[in-house]
Image: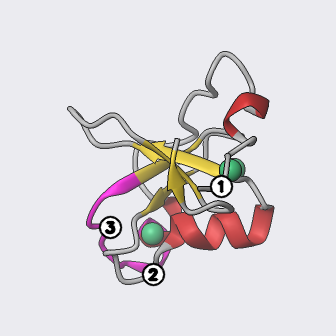
Amino acid sequence: MKQCTHADALPLPEPGPLSDTCLECLATGTHPVQLRLCLTCGHVGCCDSSPKRHATEHYKDSGHPIMRTFEPGEAWRWCFVDHVLV
Ligand SMILES: [Zn+2]
Ligand SMILES: [Zn+2]
Ligand SMILES: [Zn+2]
């Protein structure tokens, strides 16, 4: 089992969300299924079940390693680099 070191390097406090929906989806007229919040910069992007997967796109563009769910009532974080819940 790989140890994730990215969670310890996240900024504190957690960055506030830059938007309340996926702005890339808003711009292109696609609909997010669920939303994810980047814990490095506060980018809000759509999940991998959404047509455009902008949260994953954001990771590829920025290298920001960890996002958390932006869905009410859910609380988990995912490391894109290690592919583990952290
Ligand atoms: Zn990690
Ligand atoms: Zn999107
Ligand atoms: Zn980010």
Q: Is mark 2 within 8 Å of ligand 2?
A: yes
Task: Tell me which label, 1 or 2, sits earlier in the chain.
Answer: 1
At label 2, counting other C-alpha atoms closer than 10 Å, the crowd grade (few under 14, some 14-19, many 20 or more) is some
Closest to the observer, 66 or 44: 66
CA gap between label 1 and label 3 equals: 31 Å
Q: Residue at x 76, y 70 (%)?
A: 61
Q: Is mark 1 within 8 Å of ligand 1?
A: yes
Q: What predominant SS class does the magenta segment belong to?
A: loop
On screen, residue 30 above or below 33: below
Residue 9, x across and y down, in percent: 79, 32
* Residue reaching furthest to the left: 73
CA gap between label 2 and label 3 equals: 8 Å
Residue 38, x across and y down, in percent: 59, 46
Do the residues bearing badges 1 and 3 touch, measured as CB atoms within 8 Å? no
Q: Which mark is residue 52?
A: 2
Q: Which residue is mark 1?
A: 2
Residue 79, x across and y down, in percent: 59, 53
Q: Is residue 14 left or right of residue 29?
A: right
Magenta residues, start to end: 26-35
Q: Residue at x 50, y 43 (%)?
A: 19
Q: Is residue 15 left or right of residue 77?
A: right
Q: Amino acid at mark 2?
A: Lys
At label 3, counting other C-alpha atoms closer than 10 Å, the crowd grade (few under 14, some 14-19, many 20 or more) is many
Q: Residue at x 56, y 63 (%)?
A: 83
Q: Secondary structure at mark 3?
A: loop
Closest to the observer, 51 or 86: 86
Task: Tell me which label, 2 or 3, sits earlier in the chain.
Answer: 3
CA gap between label 1 and label 2 equals: 29 Å
Q: Amino acid at mark 1?
A: Lys
**Front: mark 1 or 3:** 1
Q: Which mark is residue 32?
A: 3
